[in-house]
Amino acid sequence: MHLSVLDWLIVVAFFAVTLLISLYYRKVAEKGMLGFFLGGRNLTWFLAGISMVATTFAADTPLAVTEIVADKGIAGNWLWWSFVLGGMLTTIFFARLWHRSGVLTELELIDIRYSGLGAKWLRNIKAIYLGLFMNALVIAWVNKALISILAVFFDIPENELIWYAAGSMLFVAIYSSISGLKGVVVTDMFQFLFAMTGCVVLSILVVNSDKIGGITGLKEKLPPETLNFFPSLGKVGSGSFSLGWGDFIAFIGVIWWSSWYPGAEPGGGGYVAQRMMSTKNEKHSLLATLFFQAAHYCLRPWPWILVGLCAIVLYPDLAAVDKKLGYVMAMRDFLPNGLKGLLLAAFFGAYMSTISTQLNWGASFLVNDLFLPLSKSYKSDKQVVRVSRITTMLMMFFALWVTTMVGSIKEVWAFILECGAGLGLVLILRWYWWRINVWSEITATIVPFAVFGTLKILQENGFDSFWIKSPGSIFTTVGITTIAWLLVTFLTKPTDESKLQTFFDKVKPMGSWGKYGADNRSLPYLFLAWLGGVSCIVGILFFTGSLILQLSPQVYYYLMMAGGGFGLFYIASLKAGLFSNN
């Protein structure tokens, strides 16, 4: 595709502004690990929240939504909408606790919550497993998406695409290693606003094109069931969400609380925990996470969904090739000069916001939770920052190598989801039940891999059962893992009393804490606030969609749902003292 001089100027200006922002915040990063990895713990709720949203808006996200819509209609998005239950759980029950813990990384929580040699080894092993291995897999699938975009945009030969991804990653690694988290967060905000502007512009141009004829024309050209917001359970048909009861229950009833998944970890974790811990105080931590849920589910999806619906009409032959490319083809076919550069820069922004966060977050694990505990010679802030920058660059090269090994984004997604199944409940209960110990978490981390491998062997040997293949395999893995870690919990000694007492005094958790005397008076109000928050988010999401798609009377129903949910959330939050200043 040909880009005009104006297009290239927009792209170059975008990269230049990103680099200038990172240079501006260089001094914050040089103040030691607290500056490099947590921005000095001084972020406002808006900066931290929008950075969370920007990180989840990767180069692959609009493409993935386009593919989902082409396969299953709007309702197919329940594959990720279901995580709103876990996201709001993190907001209500965990945001303040993470900030209160005072840890630099989520793995440091292992040190203050558990005792014994097992805690030391779990922290070291998870630093490698999450910070290097799983992190590299996430970066690899984002790289794969960028490669898909560049292939359609510029018709680059397949054997050369990896070098373009390498160049993009190198630029991200340079600016994120210069600026640390504060620069990453500010560039996230700039990149997100740029990316969302581009996506909104594209959706308006495509929907109002002659080939679509506006919202009315789009609705006339699509099967009616494609516009359903909820799945047609058990039905299989063109444009409908072909979902059985097992699938629906797996996503709505099990996966959101049971499975570790990047950006949607039960109880918070990953870069979400990093952002919560980087805020000024507990109130900012909670508000940042609340803003993240609202923007993630209500602000972002509809421009992508609209283009995905249009792609069904515009590119019916893509079913035999690659449905997700409908988004990129719409960019190629409907954007005039100047706006092509805007959208290309927008996708680079989405890509860079995710990669920069993953590199900074992963480096924090490897430096704070692996390298420094094992090293005695690196003590000064200057030395630690130098190691952090070198680690960021080395991680970039490792992730690039992993990219060359990965064949399918879907395979990576399935592997991560299934090998984290069953761990989530331990990550939740370690805050609310004193009896959880380090062996509980070790068991819940290891067992899913054993179950995943066993189920794969059974599939390869011809076994055909609901409990072996997805989504039934999720139920199998969660069930076996839960039984295993519960048995191990009661067969092993609890965490040392002195460690539990110190943790309780510092974090002040609720739940079942026995003799430590947790104050659970506000717990029922927290559950009501959670239910109200979920209802409000889902109501706003569907109200917006109904308004855009001119669906009446649904628009009024969802407005009432959003209003009622907000009312319940607001009253319950006041009763629980959620927004008190700390």
Image (cartoon, rainbow, N blue to C red):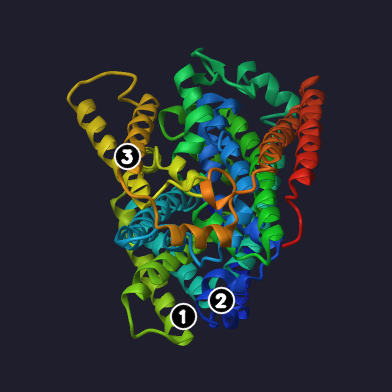
Q: Sequence-wise, which precedes: disc 2 or disc 1?
A: 2
The residue indicated by pointer 1 is 385
Q: Which quadrant is home to the C terminus?
A: bottom right
Q: Which mark is residue 448?
A: 3
Question: In percent of the image, x 26 and y 30: which residue is there?
Answer: 455
Callout 1: SS: helix
> Left or right of 393: which side holds 21?
right
Rendered position, 416 above or below 242: below
Disc 3 to disc 2, C-alpha distance: 36 Å
Q: Sequence-wise, which precedes: disc 3 or disc 2?
A: 2
Disc 2 to disc 1, C-alpha distance: 9 Å
> Which percent across, then down, holds residue 183?
59, 71
The residue indicated by pointer 2 is 35
> Left or right of 159: which side holds 40?
right
Question: In percent of the image, x 21 and y 27: which residue is there?
Answer: 458
Dot 2 amino acid type: Gly
